[in-house]
């Protein structure tokens, strides 16, 4: 599949204590590089897609290392080298009743100080088919919200399909604007959206009532944002830090499809499970445009496998995902 | 909370193969320092209490290292530097149907050769509110049984609240006395006791019948040891080496309270889960003296979290424990 | 138990990423040495048996290392030092819905280029009681099929009890012969066989129908191979890569015995679980020849414990296995 | 030695690739906590001194971890919990001709946003004998320069001996002032100074000529800063990243003393070697106030040992340092 | 520098025990991917060149992993996915008087079974400026010797500059031809050659006498291979496994230039030091075509730094190399 | 070489911090099993000798692990399973000016509580050619001194060659006897002795003067102990913890031979260097009985290589040692 996909977002250094240790008193950190959009892009590249990652990193060994990691997944990179530091997040794996914990340290990063007019979007979008971004980027600074708008206008004009993962993180929106003041003006350019009922008011400024279900809510969303053709959400229940059950809903052409579910009994790393879903969905829509249910099942199987893989990025190939989707379980060693 | 708490017990070097390996053929050992009473003290210090640890260690790099570790949890230390060696225990993590295994190598340790008259208890207990010890110490030597008695008499005279964890380990009582010949004379000084029905005959020299339940047994205990005001026990069922369910009972003023239960599906390390409970109980009694049920629930939540933390010591803070106690599960990453 | 047991098979270098990582992007590999027959032999030696391992390895540091590892389990070794390379297999641990994966790289290994006439079987079998081999060896080359036959003829003549684990791996049979063209001529020498219904047509060239159960199938096998006295199979269900339930069936003197079952909730490493069963069975038959049900239960308990042990080889001793078989669970730390 | 010593400075998280790896492509980082002044304080505490560390850290798991580490060396802590983040520096160990490399990421740290009036210096300095700070602190922000002045005025008034390590790092002075605009007003309070000829113009605003030697330069310094009684510098030559030779000069009462030299053939970690010297010097002046040559030799031996110890902090005890100073070499295993 | 460079060679999996351990009894192996030509290519890519790597790898997780690693250095890849296995070499780091040791296990690898006509050289060489290969490739099989010739003919026709590293490894030439029967027909296409006096007879079939020096020998070479414009050799002396001194000679236009020398006192990893030199030389010739002495010095500085870097590949950037070349040593931490 | 060699001594668990870390604050320990005599035996077995190790270990997982390790080197074992604990020693690697450090924790070990009459020496010595012991064993307890005498009498009667390594460790002789009260009665049975001038008074009760050289001293020894035929000593100079120069002297038939010397510039682990020498000497005397100079050179080369190998035991084979002895250095990678 050679259709060109553009993803835009921050690449962070993730520091995690090994072996489920707590940050407190940990003497080593495992280093991973990732970020919501880059994770989705890397997964798409591993599925054989032609992916370009647009981001910004500092001109130092951390920036070089992050870019090298992105290249290693087979993505092309358009990295603006500027600014002072790579954004960091500390991630403490949870276990059983102890929740995982993320501590962000990404203020003043190279990416969060990006300015409008810096990126040559027209060249980047040339020959591209799809543009993916997430709600994390406009949360980081007013400037980045403007960069997002700039990109979305050009991508729309050039006819790219546009997807967004709302990824609502209240703790990141701290430059004086709320998500629902900024996001609606960006979502209006999007064709595909990943978000849940809770995001309605927070991100889309659309009120819901306790009685609303996915069907109602997504209908309202589509009414407000007429370009939206496909809306999806992942579901997680019976969850503790080590096990959970996942499923998905997909809404398209006024119909809601609910996927099968996967019981995941032993979680290795749940960071990036949503990004793996997003990548699976984009791959699925591009591959089976007439069968969005299949796209959704593929996305969920991808997300299921991500839970068994350390780091931010789903390392599974298309065949692994299809095998699970078609009923294989993990109970037999593949020889 | 600035009330001063004194804990007295041995600090051991724990040697455990990493990654659930067996001792047999293991090429590295993880080193932790701990012991039943020190574990409880460290947990109390991490909860913000003013804790003094009284112990003995050799004047060598192992002794220095053990003390440094104790300081790192925020405890103050009163360490007698004497003797030849630090006590050791080897701990092999179990998994599923394979039980964990402890091999003690603590004979002739600096602590076990402590003698009466060595420790200046009056100075140590000055301004203190609480004294905690466990049944492990008098098991180690006749001398240590005498040191315990010496401490208990002075603590009683000085009006400290006294707690004991029976911690009955038959394999440690090998200097010629049985636990139930020694323990009753020490338990009579105690206000708070952690112990189960099985301990009645073994430790308290009080017979029980198969029909006795916690209520009956604890009533008998209180009758014999009139100072006892609060008696607790932890319960463990549906257990293998990787998962179990825990609960607790607390008896006070002739009433028995049974806690809620926690199903722990993935155990990281169960050593010290009882000590975490003990620390939680002491914290709870000091913080909510009018609400021992709350103290007991807090203690159980603390113990639950300990199962998810490597090493002997519960690294959880008060907020983590309260969050679990108030209904949070591990299913959501804290950001 | 001093009865001499001979095992014959390849010793491979296993390379596995640590900590459930995938091979893709793994920067280190854990090195284990093992192979179906060697695993069984090592486990028997750890149970106190007098085991000789017959194999071939290259005259280099890898060969020396593999032999050293075999010696470390208490086996004696008869290693032909010849050829160019040690056989390798890469093993990627699965997790939950992600299956484990084996990639073989064992062509042209020292063992697979062994030729008939190289091994002095008469000397090796002197004073021996039992000979164990598996269906992996004749899969590797025509030459090795001939070596197997050579050994089986002599072992038969010298009166050894002979056991075989069918271990059918379709991907290994690629020198132009199918398993069911080769295996029947070898199985006819065997007294004890480990294999399941699926192997009937593939390995023994005996047709089965969908309605056949163990009883029917094993009856047909015994009819065709009149020397077969004991036939066993392990069962695995409710399986994913991290948990499963196991049981066993044993057929002897026209009766089928079905074992109890073990639910294994947290698998550490399932490679070698069949070999651990085989070792337990041989030990059991030698120890309780009049009580094959007990032998079978012992074998299953051995296999259960193997799931909790990293590497190819069951490191459990007789007492550990008996304890589990007699009802101990892993829920209590052994002190 | 129970004289109370106060040190003031930032505690940073140091992230270093293990085993001399480069930051580029490193997958793990070793975590150490330290900083020039904290390193000196920790070393003094390990020598038995009564040390208080004054600093600021964020109210999160990194802040807690850093404080725990400081406690583990036996220091007391006065930590202001404020601000957003812990300062970081990445350290890449060099080897042979490849130089070590430090990348600072400490802007906007909790410490660097400290403000005048926050710290209760009078209480902290009560009963204290010595105050140690370094030129790194006023480099970080105008606010911190003011905090330094505030502390120095009070320390002077209360009669503490004051030592400063110039620690000139041009890359840190970037808030608009040069070191030599700020430092002279702070140095005038100091009794003991660690600095070299190169610092004269950069830090003290005192010109030197190419012909000036230590004697001339230090004389000029003493003339300008009349409180200065003892001035020292370490020397390093024949250096690559793995080996070097060190020595020291000490100037006091108009006399210059040059120490013996140590050839260090295998450097483990040279970070903190200057801080180890500073700690040794403070210990030496307090212990042998009449014999500053001995103090200087002791300081140099301490610094020599630091080169053989991983991390920022000299873990050597007084006896180890005296042994080296008195002629022991590393050529004999101590048993 | 955007000139396109093509490198052709095998990418191997290198398995090395960590921490200078021996292969014998090592329980883990560090995994690196590299090979003489790929190492040179990766280093050139890290210097900013536009490099394409042409190779063959199996269609499995090892092949994917090797390609991912090559991408991570910034190279483009043209990988033929074919064959059964990735070639392996085991590398045991030496120390002091114990030499390093390489055990090859690369027979029947995907690369060594490449056939003429498989690679589309014309497309690959389009717009390319330089082609680099080494004497290892024609050593592996007759087929590969033919592939080399095929590539060299086309590269010559298309006007690329061609460089070769003789890399004479007697143990690899075992398909029935000697190096000096094959190499001369390939060397005749080359412009730049890396090789020493010892290679004259073995690789070029040109006799030398004991009295011949570099000048004589290189003159003979140039006479026989008239296209050769630049001939270089690295020198190594005062060597043990942990330290050595290196230098280089460069012959061009009938003049011999001898470089300065570097004493490397602590070797981290000397594998790939020659490939780092080769990369430096290519970079140097492309950058300073009029100043081959400078190119040679740059190449030697690159090689010097490689000795301080773990793995096969020189991770140094242009600035690092220039700094060393211009006189910086490793004695000062870069901040 | 199939001559049977018996070695007798304690097998200890060695616990060492990895990567040159200090014991203080180390969080993991590498585990090795060894002891002076076992180290010599293992090295002899790796050279192809038929070695039996006689020792005592506890009946627990540590004892099993230690025996397994001994078997892995190819030794046979005669282990008395008795007593409570395995002896331990902590070893802290030194570096440069920081000396290595050993902390013994071996009191009350299984070995040190061995009693006379426990070991069936006659059976063990059957068909044996050589018996090796060291001065460590009689230092541990009066009982062990008696066991040594018992063994020596029988070995003498049965005609074995007897070697002793004096291995004088003052800190071990603490049961009330001095070495020179016990050792002379044991040395009188020995043919081969490893010891230096300093041992003369301490171990052999023979006074020396400052003017005595090896020749004088060894002459006196031979006069007192007439059975002594060969006396050797290793020499170490220009030593720090990371580098030194070694040589040896051998005295036989009234002649003193001084070996060449090796400068070891980078020591990996010097523990066991003397035991490696001892093994080399025994191998040498057995192999070249007419050429003791060669034996001595072989022993020194073995000892030199041991310095480059982690752990207690020299893993070098005969060919490696001969290669060094014949002039190879470590400067060339063996391919």
Image (cartoon, coloured by chain):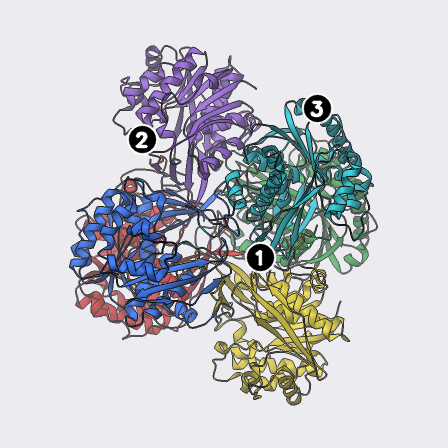
Chain colours: A yellow, B blue, C cyan, D red, E green, F purple
Residue under label 3, please give it.
C158
**Which quarter of the image is occupied by the C terminus of chain E?**
bottom left
Measured as percent of width and height from the top left, residue C175 is found at 80, 40
Above/below status of B242 relative to F227: below
Classify residue A54 by image quadrant: bottom right
Between label 2 and label 3, give the one nearer the viewer. 3
Between label 1 and label 2, give the one nearer the viewer. 2
Residue at 76%, 53% in the rendered image:
E80
Residue at 56%, 89% in the rendered image:
A207
Residue under label 2, please give it.
F172
Measured as percent of width and height from the top left, residue A166 is found at 59, 78
Above/below status of E209 relative to A170: above
For the residue labelled by badge 3, is the local secondary structure a helix, a strand or a loop? Answer: loop
Name the one closer to the observer, A236 or B77.
Answer: A236
Measured as percent of width and height from the top left, residue E72 is found at 63, 58
Residue under label 1, please give it.
E318
Name the one closer to the observer, C144 or A89.
Answer: C144
For the residue labelled by badge 2, is the local secondary structure a helix, a strand or a loop? Answer: helix
Dot 2: chain letter: F
Mark 1 surroundings: few (<14), some (14-19) or many (≥20) residues within 10 A: some
Mark 2 surroundings: few (<14), some (14-19) or many (≥20) residues within 10 A: some
Discs 2 and 3 share one subunit: no
Discs 1 and 3 share one subunit: no
3D distance between C-alphas at marks 2 and 3: 56 Å
């Amino acid at each position: 599949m050679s259709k060109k996909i553009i993803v835009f977002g921050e690449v962070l250094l993730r520091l995690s204590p090994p072996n489920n240790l707590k940050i407190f008193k940990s003497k080593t950190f495992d280093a991973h590089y990732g970020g919501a959009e880059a994770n989705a892009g890397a997964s798409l590249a591993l599925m054989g897609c032609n992916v370009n990652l647009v981001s910004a990193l500092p001109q130092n060994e951390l920036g070089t290392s992050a870019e090298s990691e992105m290249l290693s997944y087979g993505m092309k990179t358009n990295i603006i080298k500027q600014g002072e530091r790579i954004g960091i997040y500390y991630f403490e794996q949870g276990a059983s009743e102890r929740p995982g914990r993320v501590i962000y340290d990404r203020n003043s990063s190279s990416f969060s100080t990006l300015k409008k007019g810096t990126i040559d979007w027209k060249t980047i979008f040339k020959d591209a088919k799809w543009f993916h971004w997430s709600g994390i980027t406009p949360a980081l600074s007013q400037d980045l919200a403007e960069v997002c708008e700039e990109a979305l206008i050009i991508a729309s004009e050039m006819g790219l399909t546009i997807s967004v993962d709302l990824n609502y993180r209240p703790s990141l929106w701290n430059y004086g604007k709320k998500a629902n003041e900024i996001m609606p003006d960006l979502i209006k350019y999007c064709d595909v959206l990943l978000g849940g009922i809770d995001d309605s008011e927070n991100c889309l400024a659309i009120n819901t009532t306790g009685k609303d279900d996915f069907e109602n809510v997504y209908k309202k969303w589509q009414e407000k944002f007429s370009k939206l053709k496909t809306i999806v959400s992942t579901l997680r229940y019976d969850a503790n830090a080590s096990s959970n059950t996942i499923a998905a809903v997909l809404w398209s052409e006024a119909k809601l499809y609910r996927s099968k579910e996967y019981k995941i009994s032993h979680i290795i790393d749940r960071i990036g499970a949503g990004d793996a879903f997003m990548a699976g969905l984009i791959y699925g829509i591009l591959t089976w445009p007439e069968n969005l249910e299949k796209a959704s099942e593929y996305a969920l199987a991808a997300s299921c496998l991500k839970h068994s893989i350390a780091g931010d990025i789903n390392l599974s190939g298309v065949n692994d995902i299809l095998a699970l989707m078609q009923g294989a379980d993990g109970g037999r060693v593949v020889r």
